Amino acid sequence: MTSQSPRPVTGNAAAASKNTRGWFLGHFIPGEDNPLHNADLEVKWFTHAKGETRPEWSPANGVRTLNILIRGRFVLLFPEHEVLLEKEGDFVLFGPGIAHSFRSENESLVLTVRWPSIPVATGV
């Protein structure tokens, strides 16, 4: 009897995240057997429209967040300062315990990674 090794999971981040506001890996992905259902890590692939902003602060929570700019011009807002992501690959790492918001100065594609993947007050 031979054992089969696990197969890699493939897909498209934009398509996989269409109904979850950009999130395609994390605890909130339905199906316990779904390989994208994960309690360790959350991943988001999202294009923010020019001028888009979050009017309220995302509350401080127990996760770490990494935002990486793929294209565009994107500003992460924190209570005491702002961080501008303007070159491909610019990133900001923050948390846990840091409230934040954002402003998209141009159409911006941002890859977001959060860990661990736990329910927080802001939901998906």
Image (cartoon, rainbow, N blue to C red):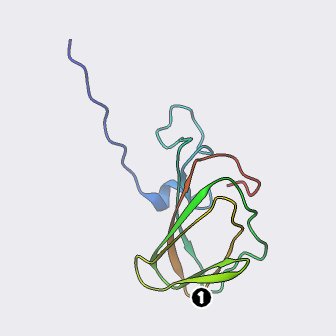
Residue at x 71%, y 80% (from the top left corner): 80
Tally of marks: 1
Residue at x 71%, y 56% (from the top left corner): 61
Reading the image, the residue beneath label 1 is: 105
Q: Is residue 19 visible?
A: no
Q: Identify residue type, mark 1.
A: Glu
In percent of width and height, residue 105 lies at 59, 88
In-image side of 116 versus 69 (left or right): right
With respect to residue 7, does 23 lie above or below? below
Outermost top residue: 1
The quarter holding residue 39 reads: top right
In-image side of 109 versus 89 (left or right): right
Q: Nearer the viewer, residue 58 or 52?
A: 58
The quarter holding residue 9 reads: top left
Q: Nearer the viewer, residue 117 or 2?
A: 117
With respect to residue 60, does 28 lie above or below? above
Quadrant in the picture for the N terminus: top left
The quarter holding residue 114 reads: bottom right
